């Protein structure tokens, strides 16, 4: 039984970096979404936002830039800005040492 458990521990530590980054992206997006008051007014609205984010060592957002949003509309632009502000407010984040990342939000989550 101990050999089986040791094998499970070893295989779970061999997670590819891309999978870990996806999990980190989801963790940060979900945490920021919890601080985002706007979604209650977004029933039925779909939004995709790509952000470039820089963090401090402590996990606070140092810089956030909106790289893209879909649909291309004034409403989506305002919602993307509002989400970026929520991202700043909700920190610090456990970034696992990552200082910069491309963060993607697909709403609804």
Image (spheres, rainbow, N blue to C red):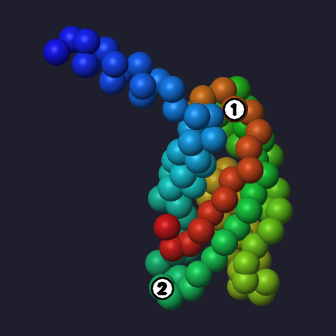
Query: In the image, what residue occupies the spot 62% across and 63% down?
Result: 105
Q: Mark 2 sits on what residue?
A: 43
On the question of residue 68 being in view, the answer is yes
Left or right: where 41 falls relative to 68 = left
| Residue 8 higher or lower than 86, as above or below | above
- Residue 90 screen position, x and y as percent: 57, 49
On the question of residue 90 being in view, the answer is no
Q: Disc 1 or 2, which lies upstream in sequence?
A: 2
Q: Mark 1 sits on what residue?
A: 98
Left or right: where 89 falls relative to 13 = right
Query: In the image, what residue occupies the spot 73% across and 83% down?
Result: 71
Badge 1 density bin: few <14, some 14–19, many ≥20, Cα 10 Å: some
Question: Which of pointers 1 and 2 indicates the residue nearer the eye?
Answer: 1
| Residue 45 higher or lower than 5, as above or below | below
- Residue 64 screen position, x and y as percent: 78, 52
Say which element carries label 1.
loop
Query: In the image, what residue occupies the spot 33% across and 24% down?
Result: 8
Query: In the image, what residue occupies the spot 57% across and 55% down?
Result: 29
């Amino acid at each position: 039984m101990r050999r089986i458990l040791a094998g499970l521990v070893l295989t779970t530590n061999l997670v590819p970096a891309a999978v870990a980054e996806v999990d980190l992206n989801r963790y940060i997006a979900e945490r920021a979404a919890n601080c985002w008051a706007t979604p209650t007014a977004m029933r039925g609205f779909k939004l995709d936002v790509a952000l470039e984010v820089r963090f401090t060592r402590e996990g606070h957002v140092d810089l956030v830039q909106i790289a893209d949003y879909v649909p291309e509309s004034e409403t989506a632009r305002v919602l993307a800005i509002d989400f970026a502000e929520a991202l700043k407010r909700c920190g610090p984040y456990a970034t696992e040492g990552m200082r910069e990342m491309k963060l993607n939000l697909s709403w609804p989550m």
